[in-house]
């Protein structure tokens, strides 16, 4: 297995051309402190917690105010590192929007939002986060979600336009096919040259392919579509139903190649799915513009889209995503990107073979049904692999930035000895 010092050096080397020298040193200090705290569920809050640690908050505020970098350059550097680290042949991008409740009206992109739980209006910020799904199994049944690019919505444009603008700035080799995995809310977004994997509404307009030959006496141009189809009626009347696996559950699936009106009548592979044990539930409709995709792969990709919800839970409740209180939009986006970069670094370290082997502490604790590590298991895992006292003698609160570069090699050497 690759030593962790090689992984960290390879990861941080991608950001050297993005940050200036002082800002890159502070970025390294954030990463090292993030690793040394051993609290995966606390993450960067230990470094710049805005309520308790005034000193760290001042450093962060000065960092995002003085040093300039482009968010899209950092996202491209992170993306190129993931492609080379995991040898990706296909890129499965995932995107979704999330709200962060605020307590001040003077912050950028703040609007009133109706909270259904509190049953009252609250001030909120809406973020669009673009990430990437990294396959962790050959059969594409397990993925890990890494954040790439945060986008702050300010109501000057549609949220779909904001997503297309952010995705258009991502750079990757032409030989790699990109896929966009989103929910029905963003199902109309298809960047040029991309394939989309999404869930369609039950009343989506679906049509047969156009007839190959013109009917006798027909006038006008050849039609773009054939007869309109009802997906639910087709599912209940179909005889060629398949049984596929959806995260341990059996799913009854009907596959068709139709054309979708909201995609400008492009050919699409349509799956009408229903759980075998829940026949009283209404079937859902999945679609992709890649007509040659395997139905099982399409089902696995859309199931992996739910992993971005776990990313939101971690970065919002445990990493301080959206907790910055500055008054500039650029500063908000830079702080959010630091959170996503650190979260991605944690995911990269946990993906090293043998690094995530940890036994459950209590024999009666069942854990998560999907087989992933809970936050308590991750905290014990990091505690077993790293020693807090060993790190804190190199990364301390009183250490200046100019002294950090001299002890960096010692930190890497100690990490390699532990592993």
Image (tube, rainbow, N blue to C red):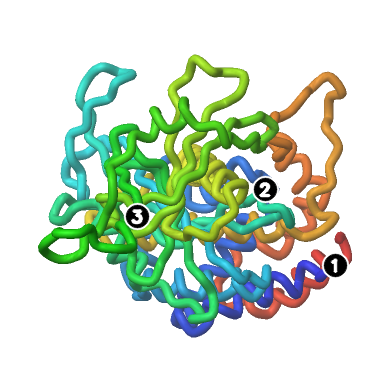
The dot on residue 209 is 3
Nearer to the camera, 337 or 164: 164
Instruction: Give the secondary structure at mark 1.
Output: loop
Sequence-first disc among 1 and 3: 1
Q: Nearer the viewer, residue 387 or 19?
A: 19
The numbered mark at residue 1 is: 1
Percent position of residue 88, x then y: 63, 69
Image coordinates of residue 321 in percent, x first then y, are 43, 47
Do the CB atoms of the residues marked 2 and 1 lie less than 8 Å apart? Answer: no
Asked if disc 1 and disc 3 are in contact, CB closer than 8 Å, the reply is no
Marks 3 and 2 in Cβ contact (< 8 Å): no
Q: Secondary structure at mark 3?
A: loop
The residue labelled by disc 2 is 142
Mark closer to the chain start, 3 or 2? 2
Residue 400: mark: none
> What separation in Å lies between label 3 and label 2 (alpha carbons)?
34 Å
| Residue name at image x 66 percent, y 52 percent | 140
Between tags 2 and 1, which lies in front?
2
> Looking at this view, is 120 or 389 the one in front?
120
Rate crowding at label 2 as few (under 14), some (14 to 19) or many (20 or more) other CA atoms within 10 Å.
Answer: some
């Amino acid at each position: 297995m690759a030593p962790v010092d090689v992984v960290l050096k390879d990861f941080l080397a991608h950001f050297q051309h993005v940050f200036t020298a002082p800002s890159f040193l502070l970025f390294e200090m954030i990463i090292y402190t993030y690793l040394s705290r051993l609290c995966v569920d606390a993450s960067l809050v230990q470094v710049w917690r805005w309520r308790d640690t005034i000193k760290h908050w001042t450093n962060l505020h000065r960092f995002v105010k003085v040093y300039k970098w482009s968010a899209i350059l950092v996202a491209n550097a992170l993306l190129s590192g993931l492609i080379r680290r995991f040898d990706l042949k296909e890129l499965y991008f995932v995107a979704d929007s999330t709200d962060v409740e605020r307590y001040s009206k003077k912050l950028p992109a703040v609007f009133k939002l109706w909270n259904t739980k509190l049953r009252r209006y609250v001030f909120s910020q809406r973020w669009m986060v673009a990430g990437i799904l990294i396959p962790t199994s050959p059969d594409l049944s397990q993925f890990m979600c890494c954040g790439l690019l945060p986008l702050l919505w300010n109501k000057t444009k549609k949220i779909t336009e904001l997503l297309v603008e952010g995705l258009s700035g991502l750079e990757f080799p032409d030989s790699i096919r990109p896929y966009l995995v989103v929910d029905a809310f963003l199902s109309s977004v298809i960047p040029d040259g991309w394939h989309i994997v999404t869930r369609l509404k039950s009343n989506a307009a679906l049509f047969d392919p156009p007839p190959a030959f013109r009917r006798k006496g027909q006038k006008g141009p050849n039609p773009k579509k054939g007869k309109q189809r009802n997906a639910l009626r087709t599912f209940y009347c179909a005889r060629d139903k398949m049984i596929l696996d959806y995260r341990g559950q059996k799913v009854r699936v009907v596959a068709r190649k139709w054309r979708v009106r909201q995609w400008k009548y492009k050919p699409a592979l349509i799956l009408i799915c229903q759980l075998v044990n829940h026949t009283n539930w209404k079937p859902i409709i999945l679609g992709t513009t890649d007509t040659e995709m395997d139905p099982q792969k399409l089902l696995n990709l859309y199931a992996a889209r739910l992993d971005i919800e776990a990313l939101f839970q971690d970065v919002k409740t445990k990493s301080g995503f959206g907790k910055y209180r500055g008054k500039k939009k650029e500063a908000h986006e830079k702080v959010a990107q630091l959170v996503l970069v650190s979260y991605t670094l944690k995911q990269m370290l946990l993906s090293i073979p043998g690094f995530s082997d940890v036994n459950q502490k209590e024999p009666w604790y069942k854990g998560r049904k999907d087989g992933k590590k809970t936050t308590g298991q991750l905290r014990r895992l990091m505690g077993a692999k790293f020693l807090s006292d060993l790190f804190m003698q190199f990364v301390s609160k009183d250490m200046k930035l100019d002294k950090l570069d001299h002890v960096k090699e010692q930190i890497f050497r100690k990490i390699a000895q532990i592993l």
